[in-house]
Structure formats: C-alpha cells, structure tokens
Image (cartoon, rainbow, N blue to C red):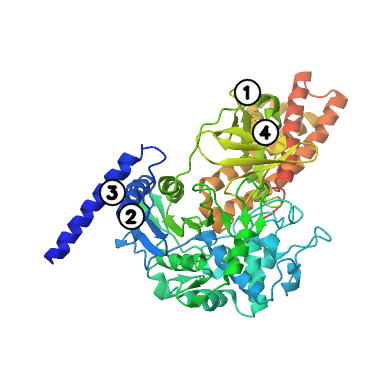
Amino acid sequence: MKNSNRFLMLKKMAVALAGLTVMVNSTASFAQVQDVTNPAIVEAFVDGTVKPLMKANNSPSGVVAVMKNGELIFSKGYGYIDVENRIPVDPETSLFRPGSISKLFTWISVMQLVEKGQIDLDADVNQYLRTFQIEDTWPGQPVTMRHIMTHTAGFEDGWLGYLIIDDPDRIIPLHEAMARYQPARVNPPGAHVAYSNWATALAGLIVSNVSGVEFNSYLQSNIFDVLGMKNASFVEPLPPELNANMAKSYRYEAGKYVELNYEIVSNFGPAGALAASAHDMMIFARALLGGGEYNGGRILKADTLQQMLDEGFVHDDRVNGMGLGFVHRNFGPDGFNLFGHDGGTTVFISHFGLSKAEDFVLFSSFSGPGAGPTHVAFVQGFYDKFFPREVPYIQPPTDFLERAGKYAGTYNAWRNSFHGVEALARALTGTVITPMPDNTLMIGDTRYVEVGENLFRAVDDYTQIAFQEDSDGNIVGYVIDGLGVNQNYPAPFYETASFTFTMLGLAVLVFISVLLRPAYQWAAFKAAQGTDRKARIASIVVAGSNILFFIVVLITVSGGLQPMMYGVPTIFKVGLVLPLIATLAAFYQAYLSVEIWRGGLLTSVWARVRHSVVAFMGLFLVWFYFYWNLLGFQYHT
C-alpha cells in the first residue's frame, strides 16, 4: 500500500511537471515539438485544455483517447455520464454519440461488398434498390456509389423535423425512410461536393439489400464482432446493457443540467446512429491503421483501405478533399496526411483523426450545449501542440487589389435545402468575402493572403481556400482545405443576408405604420367609402398577416435548433396559413392600387403613393414566400 501511494505521488508530480513544461513551451518556438508518446505531457495538455473549456461552456461530459505506434498513450473521461448520480466518464465503457463518424462503418461495409464483387462503385445504384428508384433528374448521368462516397451525387440537404428525432415510435424501416425523404437532385453527379446524410443512409440500405441482412445486424456480424468491439452499437434505443453506460444528453437551463431524451437517428441510421466508447473507437482505428486487421480479425484488405484513401474527389489538388468516404484533413505538417471524420448530433460533437505516416490516432467527444466550442478549441489546439505546422509570414502581392474584385460577394453552401422551408437558411448562413485595402481578402472573419492562382492562406494560420472558376474566368465556387465535404457557390444578391434583412426590415416598418395608422386616424378610416375603404382594409390584412407570420417565425426559432430537428413545431405548421392569406391579400391590394391610380382615387397623390408602397412590399413578400418555399406546407411530416 505504501509503495502504491508513493507511485501515485510520483505520477502526480510527473503530471504537474509536464503541465509546467507545456505552459512554458506554449510560447516557445515552432521547433520545440511536444512528445506525444509521453503520457504525462499529453495528460497535462489535455487536462489544461479540456477542463476549463468544459466548465466555461457547460459541457457535462467528454472523453479523449490518443494512440501512437499501436499503443494507447492516453485515455481519460471528463465530467459525468449521469450528472444527477455523479457517475464519472470511463473511456473504456462509457458510450458517446460520434454522429457522422458513423459513416466510416457504412463505407467499410460498402467496400466489403465491393471486395466480394457484389457492389460496383461506378454502376447506377438504382440497380441495388428494390422498392423505389432515384429520380432520373439528369438523364444519362446516374448516381453511383462513388458519387455517394465522395458526396458528389448532387442531392440537396434537409433536416427539419425528421433527420434526428427523440421519439422511438417514429422509427420506420430504412427503405421507407429513404423513399419518404428522398431529396431532389440539384446538381449533376460529380460536379459539386455537397455533404449528404440521405445518400449515406441510402448506401446502408444498399448494403442491406445486397447482403440480405438488416443493416445493424450486418455491422454487428461483419465489423463489431470481428474486431471485438463490445461497447458499440447502431441499435436505437440502445440495448439495456449498453444504455447503462451511455453518456446522457443534457441541456443547461437556469444554472442546472436538464436531461433530454436519447437522440434517434434510425431513419437515417447508417449516416449517424452509432454509440461507442473511446476504447472501441481505438480498436476500430487499429484495424484501419493495421491494413484492415486487428487481433486476428480482418474487416478489409489492405489494398482496399489504401484505395479508399487514394481515390476520391477534390475540386483543387492543392487542398485536401474527399477520399472514398474518408475526409482528408489539413492538421499537422506536410506528410502527416491526417484522415478520418468529425461528427455531431444536436448534443454531441466528436473528432476521429488518423495518420498512417505517424501511426497516430486521436478520438474525442464532448456533450451538451458547450460541446461545439470545446471541440473546436481542443482539436485544433492538440494538433498545433503535438504536430505543429509552420506558418511563415507571406507578403501580400502589391497588385492583388487589381483582381480582388472577382472574389467579392456572398457565398452559400451547396449543402443546403432548395425545396423545403429550411431553404431560408441559405440566406442566413452565407459567407461574405470582401477585398481589403492591405491586399488581402476578408473571408468571413478571417484575413487571407493570395499564395497562388485562386489559392489563399489565412494570414495567421495554415488554413487554405481554393476558388474555382469557369472557362470565362468567372468564380463559380470555393472549397476549404481539410473540409472537402462541401463547396460554396457565389450567391445571387437576393440570397444574401444583407438583402434579406434589409427588405424584411423595411417591410416591418411599412406594415407597422399601416397597423398604427387607424389608431390616430380612426375618424378618417371610419368615414372611408368604396375603393378607399377597401384599400385601407386590404392594407391592414396584408400588414397584419405578414407581421403575425414574422412573430410565429421568431417564436419558432427562439426555441433553438434542437426541437426543430426533432419535429416541426405546431405553431409553425399553423403559422404557414398566414403567407397564404398574405398572398391573396397582396394580389387584391395590387389590383386596387392599379384602380386607384387609374381613377385618381384617395385623398391625395401622397395617399396613392403610400398605398402603392404597401402594395409593393406585399408583392415582395409574395415572391419571398414563394422563393423560400414558405407558400404552402413544404416540409416532411
């Protein structure tokens, strides 16, 4: 017992010294690289980063595991899987939700069947579907499994009320979900990268159809059991023996954690339903770095895994893009060649990064409302500390402003809805690019400097952005190095936040003035006759119905993203009647406006102008509702 206590004291001293070393070296030069094989140094850095981040951002649970040269260097849980009962996170048994990291298991399953000759990566996937077909939007250009695995199939994205749910009674068979939620094809296959959960889930359905085995059972038999992953499952809800070790979902409200239901991804299961422990993710990583084999169990041939890394899609060879399912990341120095995937649900954010060159793996997962900030700061901080990448100063070209204008504008992501009510997110989430006087580009909130033709690097970081142009030299999009799952396109002015908020703000001012006018001109309103009275009433209906709808939208979004993911709020469903009323009233008011000018009606020219302004704003909102799919009930039930 005394020797044990002495060992613990020595270990604590080593950790403390390592922490001091990390703190001292944090301001040291690039050449002083931290030793990732030293558990004490790794623990000191992770503790010093994760603990304050989780506390500051109200993240109730987290886990980090590090592997180097086939050895588990570090694994540790932070916080509690059950806050009320103070059950701490155990990296060996505690389960987290890795979100889209689940896709890697789906891609491995696909490639297992490719090895058997049962799936052709370049064949029309419709031949593998039994109960429905992908619509032939682009004749002669079918969707292939290669398109699906590189996220270049051309599907729009969607999520409102159906991608993630919290009610097990809403689970339907995978083939029914794929048919019900089939998205439109908005681009020809192979043209643009746009991340697609639906397409990944479709790949899982194809695995099931071809193998003749239900997808979750296929994974259990062909991956989990083969590798000995005992704390991993795609089954929802979790089996009781695994659920006992699941990190619970929480929101933070009024100074305390409030438990949430287990998130259900089963209707898109192959895209994100996994729950797994950090140690089981390390087992999976060992197989991926071990040529497809671990502890005598093989899930793929080494050549097949290499194919998944070597083949893929990228818009510009100078930046990291997509492998066959794997995402090539930009962390680390040249030759580090990090690959893997990140993933998120509404509660959990996770990272899974692997380097064959360094025989290295990092897995992390954090939960709760502060998961995002914790994840972003920790992951980049870890790689910058242990696998730093030099960021030399670059002098901006003195003539850059001569060509900077072609990059300016707002860019929206191809990963978006184009036919559902959630399409409006395109107008609210664009990235603004502005040329700066110092010959740099402001992209979002970061300055970039030109380092090559249509290639830019962050001034104080190694992140690069590559622009694409057409044969006429017009910019048609850009991609971010290491985030090759999506391309952004130049948005027309009417899809930008500046135009949208400006016009909606003007509409609100006009409509409020319409609603207030009767209050101080009640006598004139009451005395109005004929067309004058009809025009006043029509203006009130247009203004009132639109203002009410804006209020409904504000109430809807005030509840946050989470409830909107789980289901379309009832108030929003009912509220969609208001744009229909507003549209009918706007057309009637526009008709009256023509009659008013033709007949010289109302009391003055100013009164006619005022009425026409209201009519114009009413018609603008008719276009707005139509363009953003808010006319009617364009959402999935």
Relative to 568, does residue 286 appear above or below in the rendering?
below
CB contact under 8 Å: marks 1 and 3 = no
Q: Is residue 611 left or right of residue 42?
A: right
Q: Earlier in the sequence, mark 1 or mark 3?
A: 3
Looking at the picture, which amino acid does disc 4 mark?
Gly
| Label 4 element class | strand
Q: Closer to the camera, 561 or 8?
A: 8
Residue 38 badge: 2
| Label 3 element class | helix
CB contact under 8 Å: marks 3 and 2 = yes
Please identify, in this view, whether the residue under mark 4 or under mark 3 is nearer the observer: 3
Q: Earlier in the sequence, mark 1 or mark 2?
A: 2
Looking at the picture, which amino acid does disc 2 mark?
Asn
Q: Where is mark 3, residue-wise? A: 18
Relative to 19, does residue 308 appear above or below in the rendering?
below
Q: Position of residue 150 (x, y in %)?
A: 65, 58
| Label 2 element class | loop
Q: Residue drawn at (53%, 47%), measured in percent from left and top?
A: 334
Q: Earlier in the sequence, mark 4 or mark 3?
A: 3
| Label 1 element class | loop
Q: Which of marks 2 and 4 is nearer the N terminus?
A: 2
Residue 398 badge: 1
Structural distance between the alpha carbons of marks 1 and 2:
46 Å
